């Protein structure tokens, strides 16, 4: 008799659902598809000679360090270099405040495990990073959106939301934010807003979870000081990553925060997977210690700026005037908003896939059923000629759609 | 004002505690300590030339495959080779039934997340692997021990326990077992017992979670057919690992099971860390595909057999007659039981550490407060001369302890 697995699954699996993004990756990975979907770094930017050489050396010279189990909190060497990176950004950070994770996604998962009770509201940006929301939801938390614009979350809206939740008897404890070149909108929170948000956090006893995978990839101007650098009350937890600035394939990120929190995360990580990859940690350390990574990030900044310019230029040239988009100062993403008379983002994606171009429609990024008329475009992975070609194809599609909807409007 | 973190931690963190084993690793890692504590592979057995050469090739020849994000369920190539490995052991397995995890510890964590509700009893071996129990406990499950001897879990005791739990209105759904060269006892479940346990599972609707990191490292005789190979009802979930047979530092293991279960695990893994290390997966694939790994396992079998023989020989020579131990047919562990008039395992460990020798006392492996007079000795990591020296030092200690306790007995 076949097992009825539904009888065996735990209650909490009701909250676990696959990400819309990853579910249609299979589709977008067909070689004929130009994909603006995944937030993947450009393959052609991977410094493979340096990586191959470094791997050879670290394995031959200290195979124990590179190949054996390591400490749960991560190798001391990498934590020391990473803490130094944090201090250069103005944050107080020592190796003991820092734990290495399997990419920052594991940080989001472990933090949700440690901090989120079932039914508890967690403040997020509206729209927000899908992986952050799915971590919160998988532990039964309820993401509650705080509206953002091009300067980040609106402090007045944030305070209104906090007050409302307090009145409802379910005060929030946590605000999850991607302050630099946000996923999905590309927005960067202004310094003024950061101060105001920290002030709100202080007044309402909120912890700020600052997720900063894209900060180092800044194409214009400066990155504002981090929440962790501005914080005077040790109420900020910071997530960083080597995925976008080096490679994702080693799954190495980090979490920094106050000691009691980091100790608890470390215990949770022990159970989750004992430790992160020693080989990956040694590679990140080896390529960081002599300045290679910093020089590489400077090169990446030039290279991704060209990709961003190619996408923005093509959008200006090919998209109908009613389709709005922003020009992010860094990171991987452009947020596109379609006029109200257009089909939804989801419908447009279906039409686009018929023409072998992919993006992500906006619904998955919303905590409140919004995002119907929007989409996230990533310029990080496709090469420049494909960016131009893909946007041109979509431009034709959007013009056709606009023509049809005008016709429909006339016909009504 | 300092944040009171206890106000922020989720209710479930009550269940999360650090492993006793990992907590005293810092102590055992001092260079002057001979450690029989961790279940670490021997550093000197890592095939570092092959690994260094393979890494260089896979990075240079297909950097996208090795360095980019990969599918959540793991690379198709590695899943195909791993499924073939499972079929060679007699199990029905296709790449679609299999998901790559960050070592088998992540498999234990994800399965507990998917299958274990708070307060639910989960059958485990008594004694059992600490990491398995901590995964179960961290999701609120309650490990309930089934006594084992040198032939594995006692079917009669298992059935009694199941009946008792049914009567108590809290029927178990899951039995967690390490059938080959068990951690911590080194015991291997006999074929007869496997059949009987499968029969009990069938009659009481239990899922069997078969954790088999050590099976390939067999020094004498044959490994019995796996539960998954014997199962006719698809009620077995299998965990495997490349950590002991290749290297732990890439964190690559796998989980095989029926489709509905694997699909659910895959969704949970998406949230946990998006995907396992692409670099690690490519390395495991590269070293498996042409038979290198199989030849390496044959060499390891010879080498670890020598270490086991060295430890068993030294224990026979140096330990007092009253200290009992088994001779495992494979794996990394020997289980030691002290006479009742000895100090406890925990006390003996403290005395041993004063002489710079470490092992793990038995308490942590017990679900019911047992294991006071026992200890786990691992022969996998120290070199042979250190094995002999360490056991000799402990032999003197145990003889002294025995003399003291005889004197005390005389004095009474």
Image (cartoon, coloured by chain):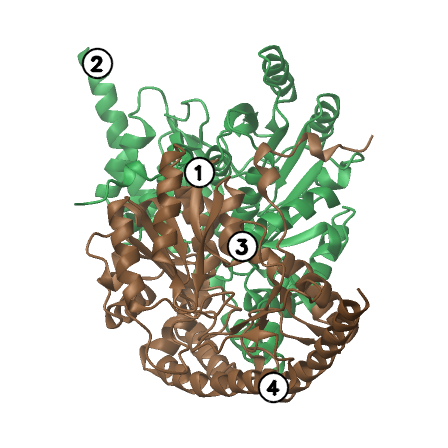
Chain colours: A green, B brown
Residue lying at 52% horizontally and 44% vertically, measured from the top left: B137
Q: Quadrant of residue B260?
A: top left
Assess whether mark 3 and mark 1 are in contact (beta carbons under 8 angstroms): no
Residue lying at 38% horizontally and 59% vertically, measured from the top left: B154
Residue lying at 79% horizontally and 68% vertically, measured from the top left: B408
Assess whether mark 2 and mark 4 are in contact (beta carbons under 8 angstroms): no
**Same subunit: marks 4 and 2:** no
Badge 4: chain ID: B
Q: Is residue A144 above or below residue B110?
A: above
Q: Which mark is residue A102?
A: 3
Q: Which residue is mark 4?
A: B314
Between residues B45 and A207, which one lies in front from this camera angle? B45
Q: Which mark is residue A410?
A: 2
Q: Is residue A228 above or below residue B77?
A: above
SS type, badge 2: helix
Q: Is residue B313 above or below residue A85?
A: below
Q: Is residue A220 above or below residue B150?
A: above
């Amino acid at each position: 008799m076949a097992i009825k697995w539904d009888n065996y699954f735990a209650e909490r699996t009701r909250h676990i659902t696959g990400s819309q993004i990853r579910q249609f990756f299979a589709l977008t990975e067909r070689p004929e598809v130009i994909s603006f979907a995944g937030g993947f770094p450009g393959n052609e930017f991977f410094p493979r000679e340096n990586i191959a050489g470094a791997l050879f050396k670290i394995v031959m010279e200290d195979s124990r360090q590179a190949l054996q189990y390591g400490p749960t909190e991560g190798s001391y060497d990498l934590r020391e270099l990473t803490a130094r990176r944090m201090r250069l950004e103005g944050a107080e950070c020592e190796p003991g405040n820092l734990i290495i994770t399997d990419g920052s996604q594991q940080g989001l998962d472990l933090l949700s495990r440690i901090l989120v009770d079932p039914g508890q509201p967690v403040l997020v940006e509206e729209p927000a990073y899908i992986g952050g929301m799915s971590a919160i939801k998988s532990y039964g938390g309820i993401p509650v959106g705080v509206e953002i614009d091009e300067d980040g979350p609106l402090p007045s809206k944030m305070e209104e939301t906090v007050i409302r939740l307090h009145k409802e008897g379910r005060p929030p404890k946590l605000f999850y934010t991607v302050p630099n070149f946000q996923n999905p909108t590309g927005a960067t929170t202004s310094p003024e807003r950061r101060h105001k948000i920290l002030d709100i956090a202080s007044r309402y006893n909120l912890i700020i979870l600052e997720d900063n995978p894209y900060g180092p990839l800044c194409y214009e101007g400066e990155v504002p000081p981090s929440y962790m650098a501005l914080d005077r009350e040790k109420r900020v937890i910071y997530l960083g990553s080597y995925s976008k600035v080096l490679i994702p394939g080693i799954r190495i990120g980090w979490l920094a925060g106050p000691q009691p929190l980091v100790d608890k995360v470390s215990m949770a990580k022990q159970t989750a997977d004992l430790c992160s990859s020693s080989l990956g940690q040694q590679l990140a350390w080896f390529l960081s210690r002599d300045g290679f990574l910093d020089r590489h990030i400077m090169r990446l900044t030039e290279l991704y700026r060209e990709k961003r310019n190619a996408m923005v230029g093509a959008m200006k040239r090919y998209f109908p005037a009613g389709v709005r988009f922003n020009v992010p100062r860094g990171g991987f993403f452009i947020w596109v908003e379609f006029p109200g008379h257009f089909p939804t983002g989801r419908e447009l994606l279906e039409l686009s896939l018929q023409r072998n171009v992919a993006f992500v429609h906006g619904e998955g990024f919303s905590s409140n059923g919004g995002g119907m008329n929007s989409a996230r475009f990533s310029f990080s992975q496709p090469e420049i000629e494909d960016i131009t070609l893909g946007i041109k194809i979509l431009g034709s599609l959007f013009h056709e759609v606009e023509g049809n909807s005008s016709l429909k409007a006339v016909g009504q």
